[in-house]
Image (spheres, helix red, strand yellow):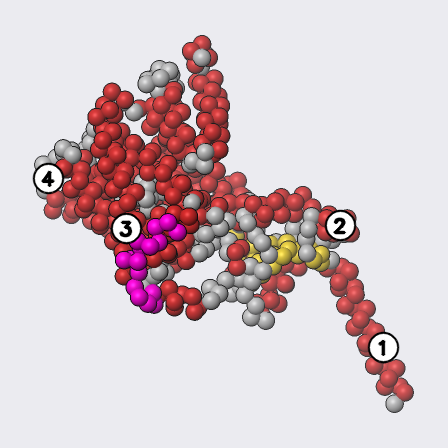
């Protein structure tokens, strides 16, 4: 192995990826998130086991890019409409959990002999739950659109906003020296005000047209997104914020555009790949000579996160009128800390606020809580059945708010039909269904077609139907029919595979131009095959026969 590593960075990276794939496969078989396996790989290849990695600088650079892409994607998901409609329960639960965890986590960390600054960083780190892991687990269990799933995603958004604000605040302390909090706060608010004004002008007058031009090519749109994210990350670092905050702002600035789902879908795979290097870099830098002293504090803090966070969520949701089961299932999603926690403490090291011991402690807490909470979420129902007799404390006699939600029935505005491909046939079908007040949604990756239909006030989204990540962003769980008007069988085959992967359980209709294409769709299980040419000819023939029949009848009279 040493000979291979000495051969050069390329061989080292190849070995790194092979080991990551093997260890990742083991983690998946144990139903564990991949980020744990990546940290293990970093430990294996770090100084603790096989010795230092020669390409450490390259890995660190890729790690920084990975974090920037991660924060960019987070910002990309936070459009203003979502923030406005986040709901009182998500906001109250999110803020309540943050406040509880910070206060008690800070006190608990101080009691363990940590400094005030370390206690601040660790307490804040304990508040963040992994959006990536939770959304993936809920999606796999088909609970993402359940009541507790929607609430969980809501307070995860609150946490994502909080982590960015925390990063910006702590970055403002860099180089503050002996300056007081008032001076630091004033400087931060001034820079935030300037950034807000600039961001508004860009979002209002520059970015919509610029992104629209870039969207003419899917590849160019991806390159632009990465360039914009890393560019603002570098600018954020230059003006005294952090690279993470700059990347988040870059994503947020594009969140209100029509192309955010497409960019998010394209970036998901890149984000996951680049974060591999962050966690490997993290694992390689863990100092095991000091971690032995952190085992007991890590265990105490892990129990605090595993038990305390769910309890506060249950208490708030119960007070607000939700059943104990809903509160319990939503509460389990915060029984862990996230990759953001590790990123946040790692940023503290780079700012000189905390030492490696704080990062080691946070990482240990992360490993324990992520591993255990994964099984808690996967087996949430059996766990609830065992604990239900003791959970009545967290439920009102009449859970009025949940009863109101149940009375609403089907979510308003959710499409019953989704049309993929908005050419002449697809756009006409969309127009006719919308005219009949049928809840419908059109999807296409042609920005000109999307823009034209949006000007006509028709419900459309920009995105690639063949991309499974993009399909997961659509309300497929409410759709009864999906219509594909892709002209090629190859495109439809990829689309049907992605649709199955996204968990769509409704019926599918396919638009074809020839009989061979129709037979292929029929063999693939498509419920209805539509041929515009034969359908139009049949309609024309019936119309002519009706006219001729009317003339003959008139002649007899």
Q: Residue at x 47, y 29 (%)?
A: 26
State which region is magenta: 385-400
How far is the residue under mark 1 from the one under mark 4? 93 Å
How far is the residue under mark 4 from the one under mark 3? 39 Å
Residue 271 locus on image (x, y percent): 43, 37
Q: Nearer the viewer, mark 3 or mark 1?
A: 3
N-terminal label among 2 and 1? 2
Work out whether 12 lies above or below 26.
above
Around disc 1, counting alpha carbons within 10 Å, would you say few (fewer than 14), some (14 to 19), or many (20 or more)?
few
- Give the secondary structure at mark 3: helix
How far is the residue under mark 2 from the one under mark 3? 56 Å
Query: Mark 1 near mark 4, Cβ–Cβ under 8 Å?
Result: no
Pointer 2 residue: 519
N-terminal label among 4 and 3? 4
Choose top left, top right, bottom left or bottom right for residue 187: top left
Pointer 1 residue: 548
Work out whether 321 lies above or below 263.
below
Pointer 4 residue: 179
Q: Residue at x 46, y 41 (%)?
A: 268
């Amino acid at each position: 192995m040493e000979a291979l590593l000495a051969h050069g960075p390329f061989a080292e990276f190849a070995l790194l990826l092979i080991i990551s794939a093997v260890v990742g496969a083991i983690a998946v078989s144990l139903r564990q998130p991949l980020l744990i396996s990546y940290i293990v790989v970093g430990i294996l290849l770090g100084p603790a086991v096989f010795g230092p990695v020669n390409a450490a600088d390259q890995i660190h650079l890729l790690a920084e890019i990975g974090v920037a892409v991660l924060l960019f994607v987070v910002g990309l998901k936070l459009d203003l409409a979502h923030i406005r409609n986040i709901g009182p329960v998500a906001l109250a639960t999110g803020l309540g959990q943050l406040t509880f965890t910070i206060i008690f986590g800070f006190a608990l960390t101080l009691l363990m002999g940590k400094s005030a600054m370390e206690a601040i960083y660790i307490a804040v780190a304990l508040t963040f739950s992994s959006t990536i892991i939770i959304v993936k687990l809920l999606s796999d269990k088909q609970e993402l659109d359940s009541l507790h799933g929607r609430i969980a995603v809501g307070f995860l958004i609150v946490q994502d906003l909080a982590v960015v604000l925390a990063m910006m605040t702590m970055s403002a302390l860099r180089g503050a020296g002996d300056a007081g909090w008032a001076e630091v706060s004033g400087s931060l608010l001034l820079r935030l005000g300037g950034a807000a004004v600039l961001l508004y002008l860009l979002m209002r007058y520059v970015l919509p047209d610029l992104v629209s031009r870039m969207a003419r090519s899917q590849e160019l749109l991806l390159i632009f997104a990465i360039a914009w994210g890393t560019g603002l990350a570098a600018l954020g670092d230059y003006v005294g914020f952090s690279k993470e905050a700059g990347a988040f702002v870059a994503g947020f600035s594009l969140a209100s555009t029509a192309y955010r789902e497409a960019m998010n879908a394209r970036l998901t795979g890149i984000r996951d790949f680049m974060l591999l290097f962050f966690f490997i870099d993290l694992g390689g830098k863990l100092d095991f000579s000091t971690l032995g002293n952190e085992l007991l504090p890590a265990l105490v803090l892990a129990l605090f996160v595993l038990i305390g966070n769910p309890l506060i969520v249950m208490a708030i949701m119960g007070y607000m009128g939700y059943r104990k089961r809903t509160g319990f299932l939503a509460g389990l999603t915060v029984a862990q800390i996230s990759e953001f926690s590790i990123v946040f403490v790692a940023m503290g090291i780079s700012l000189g606020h905390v030492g490696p011991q704080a990062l080691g402690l946070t990482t240990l807490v992360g490993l324990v809580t992520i591993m255990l909470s994964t099984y808690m979420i996967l087996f949430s129902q059996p766990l609830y059945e065992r604990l239900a007799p003791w959970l009545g404390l967290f439920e009102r006699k009449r859970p009025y708010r949940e009863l109101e939600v149940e009375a609403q029935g089907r979510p308003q505005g959710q499409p019953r039909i989704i049309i993929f491909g908005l050419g002449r046939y697809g756009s006409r079908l969309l127009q006719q269904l919308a005219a009949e007040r049928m809840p419908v949604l059109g999807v296409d990756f042609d920005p000109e077609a999307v823009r034209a239909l949006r000007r006509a006030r028709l419900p459309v989204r920009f995105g690639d139907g063949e991309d499974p990540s993009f399909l997961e962003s659509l309300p497929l769980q409410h759709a009864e029919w999906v219509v594909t008007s892709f002209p090629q069988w190859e495109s439809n085959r990829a689309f049907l595979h992605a649709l199955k992967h996204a968990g769509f359980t409704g019926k599918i209709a396919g638009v074809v131009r020839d009989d061979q294409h129709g037979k292929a769709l029929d063999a693939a299980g498509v419920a209805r095959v539509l041929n515009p040419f034969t359908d139009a000819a049949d309609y024309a023939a019936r119309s002519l026969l009706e006219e001729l029949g009317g003339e003959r009848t008139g002649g007899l009279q």
